[in-house]
Amino acid sequence: MIDPTILRTDPDRLRESQRRRGESVELIDELVVADVTKRQEQQRFDELRNEQKLLGKQIGPLQGALKKAGDDTSRAELQQQVDALMASAQTLADQVKAAEAAAGAAGEALDALWLRVSNLVNLESPVGGEADFTVIEEVGTPRDFAAEGFPPRDHVDLGELLGAIDIERGAKVSGSRFFYLKGPGALLEIALLNLAMQQATSHGLIPMITPALVLPSAMEGTGFLGQAAENVYRIEADDMYLVGTSEVPLAGYHADEIIDASELPLRYAGWSSCFRREAGSYGKDTRGIIRVHQFDKVEMFVYCRPEDAEAEHARLLEWEREFVDALEIPYRVIDVATGDLGSSAARKFDMEAWIPTQGAYREITSTSNTTEFQARRLRIRMRDENGTRPLATLNGTLCAMPRVIVALLENHQQADGSVVIPAALRPFMGGLDVISPT
């Protein structure tokens, strides 16, 4: 959620953000009207409630005087006054009840509209859709396999040759877009997990193993029940959701809490299995393990002062660079365009690894500055010398296992189908430096 003050003082800022995202500008007009209506209804309720309290203060003394009245005339006059006030009180009570209901309905309508509004974009983000990103940096040089004298195998063929990936049996057991990692493939994922957590803890992040199932409040609070809802798995019988990233349980970890500013920043590194329906991706990446329904991931998550958020964002990106550098694969860093940010992000940087058999860069990590957006939705605040106010949250993928495995296999393959293990991973592979065909 965005600070409502911005809606009331500078609605054009919201309209411009929506325009840059390619989302409804008219929604902001609806929001302005709903906000005015809600405040008017709330004001009417407050006024009637105050009137009701004042009337109650008048009735009490009259009832006391009635009990003490000595003659019938006085009693009759007081009774008439009490009866009149009681009748007014009943009418007023009905009006208060109706006004309270109207204020509640107006508030619910306003909240429903707010849930449809994405975060304010950073004005430095490139404007456009998925293809309109800006390349910030390219690192490493893709191998020239033709010059080396052999055509590269893709990760599926390599996985089968090495006994590392079994897609056929994954589909037999669970359907399309599921897979088994086995033997060296399983060891490679565990090695990646260990390397990622070693790096994260060396930078002071707190390691976390998070729940894979969350309540609707956590999913909605992080912004995954809006435009991203189609890719979320819902367990209807329990009204719970399977997470698509540990960002969700990490964001919900401090929901409804006030954190002392002296504790900030709080930095976590969460490992979880992730589940995505991949709706709308029919026909895309059907071969292999690039786009799958279940995968494991290490996600960094930060709570900080809003004024520190941009520096934290740069820090998360640097840590992602450090991790990918250790894997010795070519990659590039892109500034994601406004139409491809996702509802919570104000700005997002992706790191894309070079995939030789596709002749293209593919996303393997991402880091987003969500400013105060998620914190407001989840009612997470900080307390400093200026009082209590929302803080900022950020997230960054350190390692999405399947896509990193794809990049490792394809970039480090040899002519005989073996794969050289990067030096940084060897301590977690029992010292193994090469995976050879079975």
Image (cartoon, rainbow, N blue to C red):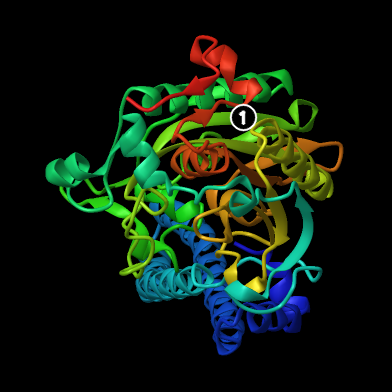
Question: Quick one: 435 or 394, which is closer to the camera?
Answer: 435
Question: Quick one: 416 or 2, which is closer to the camera?
Answer: 416
Question: Quick one: 267 or 361, which is closer to the camera?
Answer: 361
Secondary structure under tag 1 reads: strand
Residue 398, image quadrant: top right
Residue 9 at x, y percent in the picture: 78, 77
Q: Split into 4 quadrants, where in the image is the N terminus?
A: bottom right
Is 95 situated above or below 276?
below
Question: Looking at the image, which residue sits at the far top?
Answer: 430
Q: Split into 4 quadrants, where in the image is the C terminus?
A: top left
Residue 85 at x, y percent in the picture: 42, 71
Residue 98 is at least partly visible in this image: yes
Residue 243 is at least partly visible in this image: no
Residue 399, image quadrant: top right
Q: Residue at x 31, y 29 (%)?
A: 163
Q: Amino acid at mark 1?
A: Tyr
Q: Residue at x 85, y 43 (%)?
A: 386
Q: Is residue 138 left or right of residue 255?
A: right
